[in-house]
Image: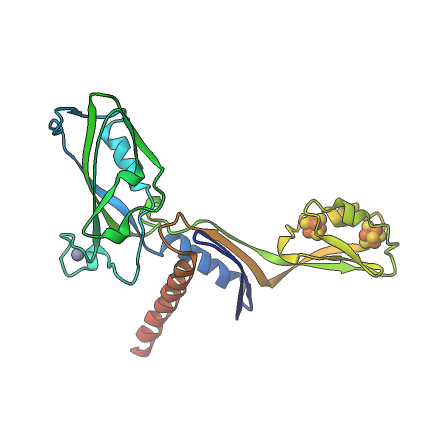
């Protein structure tokens, strides 16, 4: 197996994977979507008494809607530090090894943003995307919330899904029949991605990873000299994260989980 990153940012990755079967690549994709854990807010307490300025503790939205929005805020996740709350030594009570507590205190008039969430005792876990609007407060309104984030996975709830838009395509292979091609270049003009050129007397795809296999080039060839085929042994894999995890961490965790799953089976087979 061979992996080459075409693009790697804090929230997205595009890579070429060679030597895996489509089933193996799909297993990787599905593990990233449903099994890789990440932090998300799961418990929210609203304080309903008057604020210290004497303002009413209420906002433009019902508490349930604010809670839902809090659940979708990307929470920075360090998979090497946190354990799942149901596997933690605190027996599910919630402790610094399995949860991050945030407080939110704001008085109106104001828009309450994700950046108003203050991590308690976990200074490094301030949310990175600070401009997600949560609710609005009028002059006489305020909000006081304590929220707790824990690890979960996409198969439990979409708020814990580590990746967004994870997908792959097979590498395109351009086949030109030299005895039929008259070098008219119609195929080159028809390519919507502008990624074709002549190489001597033969058209070729200059940026294969950009090809969408739309076959506009083949359709434009009246001589039927050109075919677009797909090579399933080489895939271009693309995914994004919401910023809670670095794409490389997601990939490594997914590979660990896949390996761990098969090791479990191997150990059980060994005991038979
Ligand atoms: S459209 Fe067909 S004939 Fe014309 S250059 Fe392309 S492959 Fe050759
Ligand atoms: S299949 Fe589509 S994107 Fe790929 S080279 Fe042909 S026209 Fe361009
Ligand atoms: Zn714990």
Nearer-the-camera pick, 33 or 241: 241
Location of residue 248 with respect to 107 vertically, above or below: below
Applied colour scheme: rainbow
x 15%, y 24%: residue? 55
Is residue 224 visible in the rendered image? The answer is no
User: On the rendered structure, is 89 left or right of 149?
Assistant: left
Res 107 → quadrant: top left
Vertical placement of residue 40 versus 2, above or below: above
Q: Is residue 176 above or below residue 184?
A: below
100 relative position to 73: left or right: left
Question: What residue do we see at 16% from left, 52% from top?
Answer: 94
The relative height of residue 154 versus residue 56 in the rendered view (above or below) is below
**Residue 82, percent across and down?**
25, 58
Q: Quadrant of the C terminus?
A: bottom left
Picture residue at 71% right of the left edge, 48% below the top: 194
> With 233 as the anchor, is 25 left or right in this view?
left
Location of residue 67 (image quadrant)? top left
x and y percent of residue 27 in the render? 45, 60
Q: Position of residue 40 (x, y in %)?
A: 29, 47
Q: Position of residue 18 (x, y in %)?
A: 56, 67
Instruction: Judge by depth and name the residue closer to the eye, 14 or 256.
Output: 14
Tell me, yes or no, if residue 232 can be seen here: yes
């Amino acid at each position: 197996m061979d992996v080459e990153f075409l693009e790697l940012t804090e929230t997205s990755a595009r890579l070429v994977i060679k030597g895996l079967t489509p089933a193996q690549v799909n297993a990787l994709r599905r593990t990233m979507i449903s099994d890789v854990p990440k932090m998300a807010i799961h418990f929210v307490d609203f304080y309903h008494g008057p604020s210290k300025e004497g303002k009413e503790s209420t906002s433009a939205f019902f508490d349930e809607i604010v809670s839902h929005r809090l659940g979708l805020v990307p929470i920075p996740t360090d998979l090497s530090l946190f354990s799942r709350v149901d596997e933690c030594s605190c027996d599910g009570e919630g402790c610094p090894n399995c949860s991050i507590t945030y407080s939110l205190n704001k008085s109106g008039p104001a828009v309450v943003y994700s950046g108003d969430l203050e991590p308690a005792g976990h200074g490094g876990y301030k949310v990175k995307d600070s401009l997600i609007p949560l609710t609005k407060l009028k002059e006489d309104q305020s909000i006081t919330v304590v929220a707790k984030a824990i690890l979960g996975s996409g198969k439990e709830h979409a708020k814990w899904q580590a990746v967004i838009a994870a997908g792959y395509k097979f590498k395109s292979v351009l086949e030109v029949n030299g005895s039929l091609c008259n070098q008219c270049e119609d195929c080159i003009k028809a390519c919507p991605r502008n990624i074709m050129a002549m190489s001597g007397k033969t058209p070729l795809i200059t940026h294969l990873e950009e090809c969408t296999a739309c076959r506009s080039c083949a359709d434009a060839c009246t001589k039927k000299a050109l075919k677009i085929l797909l090579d399933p042994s080489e895939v271009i894999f693309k995914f994004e994260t919401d910023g809670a995890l670095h794409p490389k961490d997601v990939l490594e965790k997914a590979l660990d989980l896949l390996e761990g799953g098969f090791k479990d089976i191997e150990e059980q087979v060994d005991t038979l």
